[in-house]
Image (cartoon, rainbow, N blue to C red):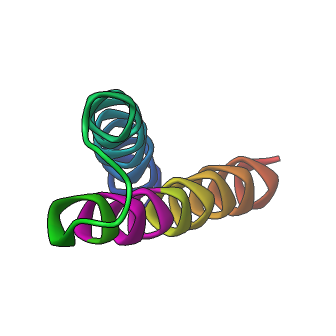
Amino acid sequence: MLLLIGRFGLFVGAFLTITCTLMAVFTSPGTAEFVITVVSIGIGLVVLALGWIAVLFERKRQE
């Protein structure tokens, strides 16, 4: 079950990070949209890291 949650976290984190990074390229700096996009990139990276940790933890537990 933890592997499924970890994989879902990896996919969501990667999707959020990639889409927000592309949005940050096309948004002008100094606007509220740019700040929200940068914060969303940080959240995406955190979700990506937590998903990666969950996958590694589950694989190590299965050995």
Residue drawn at (49%, 67%) of the image: 42
Residue found farthest to the left: 33
Q: Position of residue 30 (x, y in %)?
A: 34, 66
Residue drawn at (63%, 57%) of the image: 58
Residue 40 is covered by the magenta coloring: yes
Classify residue 31 as left or right of residue 44.
left
Q: Position of residue 55 (x, y in %)?
A: 60, 50
Classify residue 5 as left or right of residue 48.
left
Residue drawn at (43%, 56%) of the image: 41
Is most of the magenta stretch helix, strand or loop? Answer: helix
Residue drawn at (53%, 69%) of the image: 46
Classify residue 40 as left or right of residue 42.
left
Q: Tell me the quarter of the picture where residue 33 sits.
A: bottom left
Judge whether 18 appears above or below 40 on screen: above
Q: Position of residue 52 (x, y in %)?
A: 63, 52
Q: Tell me the quarter of the picture where residue 47 sits.
A: bottom left
Task: Decide if residue 31 is in sight here.
Answer: yes
Specify the segment rendered in magenta. 36-44
Q: Which of the two residues, 60 or 41, is positioned nearer the viewer here?
A: 41
Q: Please state, as top left, top right, bottom left or bottom right, where the N terminus lies in the image.
A: bottom left
Classify residue 39 as left or right of residue 28.
right
Q: Tell me the quarter of the picture where residue 15 sits.
A: top left
Task: Decide if residue 1 is in sight here.
Answer: no
